[in-house]
């Protein structure tokens, strides 16, 4: 069970308990949604988030809801009596005893917050609660609530929701269309065992959730998420330690095609996937030859690369990333130098750089072990920088027009061994 405690209007507490159980009977016929406006809003928000995340909608189960309401009343009574204990926020059986027979999974989530929206949003921002709410096995839900009257609790609402899954109900549960393997703003990662994962954007929150894609990625040197063929589905572009360059195309059915070779001899290069020329129909590759320091642009025509163009030299000691820093719709490069400064190289949109003194847009970046541009991580259609520090923490630096906003720590420890791409 996950126990968290905060204060004031945003959150007092929430906890989640998950379990499994099997019994011989089946769930009841689908009942109508709750008439109570607060509970109707909770159900609507839960199902909206589930649909957005690839899980089918929950049906309202009045039997479960009665048990949820009883427990919300119990918790409120403890608040009034001054005996409330966060360690005992759940029933000993996690709500199993209130379920109609036949459930093969169940979970109980509890929150004390100011509104239905705040309650469900908090569940979505808490790893354990989010996992329970989005569990694709769940088919039924009941919920109950009580508005507190205890002095010092600000009239907050105690909400209890109990989810359950029934095999027969799943047969008729509507399902959303397949989710893409990755979306703009997501992060790709290969672990030391060669497994590829996608970490969906949490809009600046902790990247606790990940999606296993496939194994067989041992030997990856560099990753990038890009829509190389401009079909609306994100692809995985990979440079391998062997020097091979491959593209794994995302598909409409939510899967990723096997890596397809599109080049060899790329081992000495650092790459940035970007529409370096505004007129290009497809992203190409900006590539730095680490040995010579030469910088090239490789246009892509949808089937392969056309002849490369040299766009710079002397880039050997620089770490490069692609982004639109000044918000003019043209891709720029940011480059970290040996002093840990970030320098801005603004693109012209026609294949070159603006002729100007290079602006220092940041200092103290020398300790970062990963740097890459990332688009739409916050869901605002804006660029940012994905960075990993020496302690293995993952950071996001949002780019405002011509400057940085407040950074977010989106991963705590453990990211050091991963090969990352954005």
Image (cartoon, helix red, strand yellow):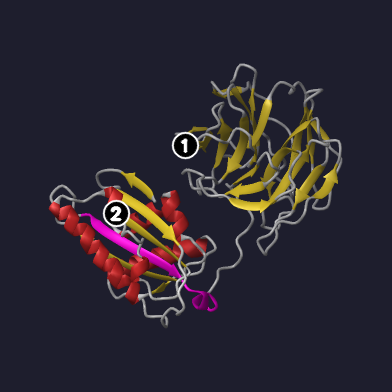
Question: Secondary structure under badge 1?
Answer: strand
Q: Is residue 326 visible?
A: no
Mark 2 = which residue? Answer: 89
Q: Residues within 10 Å of mark 1 (few under 14, many from 20)?
A: some
Q: Where residue 64 appears, x then y in whole percent?
A: 34, 72
Q: Where residue 230 appears, x then y in whole percent?
A: 71, 54
Rounded to the nearest angstrom, the CA distance separating label 1 from label 2 is 31 Å
Closer to the chain start, of discs 1 and 2, is: 2
Q: Give the quadrant of residue 132.
A: bottom left
Mark linked to residue 408? 1
Q: Is residue 241 visible?
A: yes
Q: Residues within 10 Å of mark 2 (few under 14, many from 20)?
A: many
**Vertically, is 154 above or below 48?**
above
**Vertically, is 91 above or below 319?**
below
Q: Is residue 38 left or right of residue 221?
A: left
Q: Residue at x 83, y 46 (%)?
A: 262
Q: Give the quadrant of residue 223.
A: top right
**Vertically, is 116 above or below 331?**
below
Q: Where residue 180 appears, x then y in whole percent?
A: 63, 58
Q: Residue at x 18, y 53 (%)?
A: 79
The verdict on residue 319 being magenta is no
Q: Residue at x 47, y 34 (%)?
A: 407
Q: Is residue 105 left or right of residue 349?
A: left
Question: Secondary structure under badge 2?
Answer: loop
Q: Give the quadrant of residue 292.
A: top right
* Range covered by the magenta-colored residues: 156-173
């Amino acid at each position: 069970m996950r126990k968290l405690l905060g204060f004031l209007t945003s959150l007092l507490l929430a906890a989640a308990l998950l379990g499994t159980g099997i019994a011989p009977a089946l769930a009841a016929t689908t009942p109508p949604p709750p008439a109570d406006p607060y509970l109707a809003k909770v159900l609507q928000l839960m199902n909206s988030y589930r649909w957005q995340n690839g899980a089918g909608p929950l049906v309202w189960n009045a039997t479960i809801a009665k048990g949820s309401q009883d427990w919300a009343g119990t918790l409120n009574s403890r608040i009034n009596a001054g005996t409330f204990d966060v360690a005992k926020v759940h029933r000993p059986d996690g709500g199993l005893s209130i379920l109609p027979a036949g459930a093969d999974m169940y979970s109980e989530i509890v929150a004390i917050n100011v509104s239905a929206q705040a309650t469900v949003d908090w569940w979505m921002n808490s790893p354990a609660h989010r996992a329970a709410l989005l569990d694709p096995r769940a088919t039924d839900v009941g919920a109950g609530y009580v508005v507190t009257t205890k002095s010092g609790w600000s009239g907050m609402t105690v909400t209890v929701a109990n989810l359950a899954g029934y095999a027969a109900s799943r047969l008729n549960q509507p399902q959303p269309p397949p989710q893409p393997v990755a979306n703009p703003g997501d992060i790709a990662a290969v672990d030391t065992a060669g497994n590829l994962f996608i970490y969906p954007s949490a809009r600046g929150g902790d990247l606790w959730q990940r999606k296993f894609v496939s194994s067989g990625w041992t030997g990856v040197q560099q990753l990038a998420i890009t829509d190389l063929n401009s079909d609306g589905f994100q692809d995985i572009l990979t440079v391998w330690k062997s020097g091979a360059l491959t593209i794994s195309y995302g598909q409409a059915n939510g899967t990723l095609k096997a890596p397809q070779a599109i080049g060899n001899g790329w081992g000495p290069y650092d790459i940035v996937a970007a529409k370096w020329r505004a007129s290009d129909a497809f992203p190409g590759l900006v590539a730095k030859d680490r040995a010579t320091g030469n910088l090239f642009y490789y246009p892509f025509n949808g089937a392969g690369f056309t002849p490369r163009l040299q766009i710079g030299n002397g880039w050997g000691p620089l770490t490069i990333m692609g982004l639109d820093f000044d918000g003019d719709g043209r891709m720029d490069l940011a480059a970290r130098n040996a002093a840990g400064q970030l320098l801005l190289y603004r693109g012209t949109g026609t294949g070159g750089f603006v002729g100007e003194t290079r602006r220092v847009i940041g200092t103290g970046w020398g300790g970062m072990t990963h740097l890459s541009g990332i688009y739409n991580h916050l869901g605002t259609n804006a660029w940012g920088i994905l960075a990993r520090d020496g302690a293995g923490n993952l950071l996001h630096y949002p780019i405002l027009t011509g400057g940085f906003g407040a950074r977010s720590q989106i991963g705590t420890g453990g990211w050091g061994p991963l090969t990352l791409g954005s």
